[in-house]
Image (cartoon, helix red, strand yellow):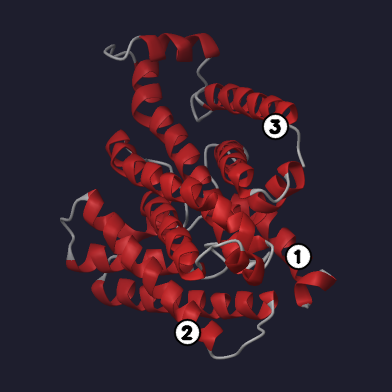
Amino acid sequence: MVSTKRVALLAVVLIAVLGALALFSLTVGMRAIPLSGVLHALQSAGRQEPSDLVVWTLRLPRLLAALVCGVSFAVAGALMQGVTNNPLASPSILGINAGASFGLALAMIFLPAASLQVTIVSAFFGAALATAFILVLASLKHGLTPVYIALAGTAVSAVFLAVTQVLVVFFDVAQELSYWTAGGISGIRMTAILGVVPWTILGLIFAVSVSRSVTLLSFGEDMAIGLGGSLSRIRLRAGLAVLILAGSAVAVAGPVGFVGLVVPHITRRIVGIDYRLVVPFSALLGALLVLVADMVARTVAPPFEIPLGAVTALVGVPFFLYLANRKEVRG
């Protein structure tokens, strides 16, 4: 059991580090802007100087997108791992991100003039469809190992990505969809951030409200039932939170992978298995990971940028292989 003082201190440290890195990220880019210039720009929103415009129209929306996506993917992954009791579960591994991308493709093809909110709802639809496929596969056989479910999710993800690519080629929308399929937040606009933030807040409310029940479920279904929990209700509420968080994040940044896999494991190592702590600390660490990954993506090979999804994959793929080879995961 982690002491309250330690939790509070850790939260303060993480928030301070996140704030410092967030401010530093506004100085990073093709055109270096000193910290004094960034602070001046933040204090003068109406000015038309080049550095002010760069901060307000390019870097600040990108910063907010990194924070929102990191929070959403990390919390969604934490809930998935807690509800399924599967250490390999995450929106990217189980195909939810690919399903959301499929929903985005449908919206771009059949509703090209749709608003961001319609696009987000389409991403929800695709994510829910992918989840349904996973549940059907899981119901075909009892006693599935985490690795088997992860492989099933990978197969579902491959199917949705293949169908998405066929639709993209057939309807000639490759250029419009390439921004999302690569997984990145360059070029994001403030209007998109303002449109997705309410969905993120709603998903976090669901996640916090179900966190205590997920803690009980992580000890086993029998204990959760014995303590008065309803499995169907817990899974429904957690599932809604996952769909809202993952779907809205994919609508903004595309299928950025492995954030929801790596962050929950690190969080549980730090604060334990109480999901009343895992959820908020996953949010902080997820935002921190995506923010650092985005800074790496735009600075490692200037003037070019590496897709954000590629940077997170460099961390996530070895971590996934490590988890898959652990003896307890196989069982």
Look at mark 1 in the image and give the residue it sits on: 323
* Precedes in sequence: disc 3 or disc 1: 3
Where residue 273 appears, as percent x and y from the top left, is 70, 51
Determine the residue positioned at 35% across, 78% down: 166
Taking the image as shown, residue 75 lies to the left or right of residue 6, namely left
| Image depth: mark 1 or mark 2 in front | 2
Q: Earlier in the sequence, mark 1 or mark 2?
A: 2
Quadrant where the image shows the C terminus: bottom right
Which quadrant of the figure has residue 130?
bottom left
Question: Which quarter of the figure is the N terminus placed in?
Answer: top right
Label 1: state its secondary structure: helix
Which amino acid, mark 3?
A: Val
Q: Find residue 234 and report its horizontal and vertical position in percent.
A: 49, 62
The residue at the point 40 percent across, 67 percent down is 127
As helix, strand or loop, the secondary structure at mark 3 comes to helix
Mark carried by residue 136: 2
Task: Out of 69 and 269, give the one closest to the viewer.
Answer: 269
**Where does label 3 land, which residue?**
7
User: Could you tell which of marks 2 and 3 lies nearer the N-terminus?
Assistant: 3
Residue at 68% x, 74% y: name it: 146
Q: From what the image shows, is residue 313 above or below residue 47?
A: below
Q: Amino acid at mark 1?
A: Leu
Q: Residue at x 53, y 22 (%)?
A: 23
Asked if marks 1 and 2 touch (Cβ < 8 Å), the reply is: no
Depth check: 227 or 209 in front?
Answer: 227
- For the residue carrying disc 3, how many other residues have a C-alpha within 10 Å: few (<14), some (14-19), or many (20+)? some
The image's mark for residue 85 is: none
